[in-house]
Amino acid sequence: MRTILLKSACLLLLLFAVDRILGFCISRAAGARQLDQRLEKLLQGRIAADIMILGSSRAARNIIGSEIEKASGLSTFNLGYPGSNIDFHEMLLRLMIKSGLRAGKIVLAVDDDAELIEDPTINFRFDVLYPHLYDEAINREICERKKLKVILTRISLCYRQRPNVKQALQYVVKGRLRPDPLSNIEEDGSMPIDGKSVTYGELGYGAVPRIYDKGRESIYLREKFRSVVELCRQSNIKLIILFSPNFFRPTDGFQNRMRELGGKNAQYIDLSIDFLEKELYYDGYHLDRKGAILFSKALGESIRRCL
């Protein structure tokens, strides 16, 4: 009996060691595969900026932090993620506060008119979080959202790292991801676009009136928006809600709704109709680099006036 118990204990120890080694290798390989290291810097408290930018691709691609810094005198870092929604931005803000980062201002670039409405083009970016499952806060966030048992992720690193297996194998075979015109991340976290979209030639200013419908709002997303406002208030962070330019007429009532929900706990900058020249755009929703430079300068000057 003693021999059986001893062999069983040795086998468990061996399995435990293999699990730890394999889980560690998967984690390291998946992390090394990534081009975007901004979240890792955030988790490690290695971002120092007076202004942090939050939002989807309208933040990531339209706003250049270095240009805001030149115009406002305030250091700026862009944490905008293409395809992300207010749920994801609220999570980033919580991580930011938890990491000890105390930016004086948050600029939240809201999406007209999908900020509070379920939209297939913007969602919670689990794929951004998975390579950082080594971090306990990220692990708990994913477990809570995926209805997983946190204890199992602590017992087995392979279980915890299973979403990263494909990325790890791709790193072994193909190495690190290579940047393209839509994924090139600059030192300030910005992702401006060089060139034009394939549909640029068909681009025309959309002037047809659209009316914002509060009835389509997601209660969940609305509460996340309110949480961003409240977190900033509690942390003594000045929240600036930004209405960005698009190559179409702003939705009637959208800005009023954002101001209603943000109230006096936020400041508002409206540049939605300041850049209507077609040559400044990549597509109907995003500026190209030239447009982003001009827009960022104007935003920096607006922020300076708010000081």
Image (cartoon, helix red, strand yellow):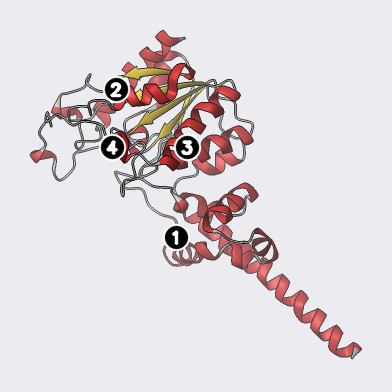
Q: What is the distance, in whole Å, between disc 4 and disc 3 at their CAs?
A: 29 Å
Q: Is residue 160 visible?
A: yes
Q: Mark 2–mark 3 contact, CB under 8 Å?
A: no
Q: What is the distance, in whole Å, between disc 4 and disc 2 at their CAs?
A: 13 Å
Q: Secondary structure at mark 1?
A: loop
Nearest to N terminus: mark 4 or mark 3: 4
The x and y percentages for residue 158 are 61, 67
Nearest to N terminus: mark 3 or mark 1: 1
Q: Secondary structure at mark 4?
A: loop
Q: Secondary structure at mark 3?
A: helix
Three-letter residue code for mark 1: Gly
- Circle 4 residue: 193
- Circle 1 residue: 175
Three-letter residue code for mark 3: Lys
Three-letter residue code for mark 2: Phe
The x and y percentages for residue 288 are 24, 33
Q: Mark 4–mark 3 contact, CB under 8 Å?
A: no
With respect to residue 142, does 72 lie above or below? above
Nearest to N terminus: mark 2 or mark 3: 3
Foreground mark, 1 or 2? 2
Q: What is the distance, in whole Å, between disc 3 and disc 1 at their CAs?
A: 37 Å
Q: Nearer the viewer, residue 300 or 249?
A: 249
- Circle 3 residue: 224
